[in-house]
Image (tube, grey):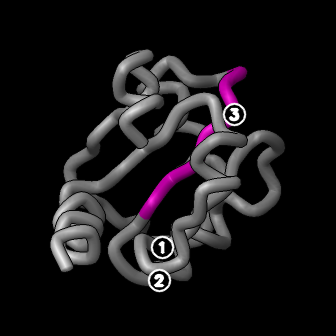
């Protein structure tokens, strides 16, 4: 993650959720961040079905939880998107 941060490829987002399962919701998020053609990895603090199901049909997008984050996924993505709570979860995991 330090490698991604050095290259300005880490974006920390405010915690959010989608009310409904719609791919358009996730596309709007990616467009708002100007990451339309970027390979992104969104890290959530815990499983969120609406966000996961909204993103699964989009190429170059992967959604995972902080406890499932792995080195391959971090290195394989262009931009790493972290929610504020997922940052806290990761800090607690690495502090041990």
Residue drawn at the location 33% of the way across and 73% of the way down: 45
Q: Nearer the viewer, residue 7 or 82?
A: 7
The reply to whether dot 3 and dot 1 touch (C-beta < 8 Å) is: no
Q: Position of residue 27 (x, y in %)?
A: 61, 40
Residue drawn at the location 50% of the way across and 53% of the way down: 42
Measure the C-alpha gap from mark 3 to mark 1.
17 Å
Report the disc number at residue 65.
1
Indicate whether residue 70 is drawn in magenta: no
Quick check: 56 above or below 11? Answer: below
Q: Nearer the viewer, residue 60 or 50?
A: 60
Quick check: 44 above or below 2? Answer: below
45 relative to 22 in the view: left or right: left
Classify residue 89 by image quadrant.
bottom left
Indicate whether residue 40 is drawn in magenta: yes
Residue labelled with disc 3:
39
Residue drawn at the location 71% of the way across and 21% of the way down: 37
The reply to whether dot 1 and dot 2 touch (C-beta < 8 Å) is: yes
Q: Secondary structure at mark 3?
A: loop
Say which quadrant the C terminus sits in. Answer: bottom left
Q: Secondary structure at mark 1?
A: strand
Q: Residues within 10 Å of mark 1 (few under 14, many from 20)?
A: some
Classify residue 10 by image quadrant.
top left
Residue drawn at the location 36% of the way across and 28% of the way down: 5
Q: Which residues are magenta?
A: 37-43
Q: Mark 3 or mark 2, which has the lower sequence index?
A: 3
């Amino acid at each position: 993650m330090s490698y991604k941060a050095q290259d300005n490829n880490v974006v920390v987002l405010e915690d959010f959720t989608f009310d409904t399962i719609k791919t358009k919701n996730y596309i709007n998020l990616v467009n708002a961040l100007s990451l339309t053609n970027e390979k992104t990895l969104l890290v959530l603090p815990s499983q969120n079905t609406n966000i996961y199901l909204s993103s699964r049909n989009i190429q170059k997008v992967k959604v995972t939880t902080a406890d499932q984050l792995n080195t391959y996924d971090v290195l394989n993505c262009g931009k790493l998107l972290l929610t504020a709570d997922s940052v806290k979860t990761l800090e607690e995991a690495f502090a041990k």
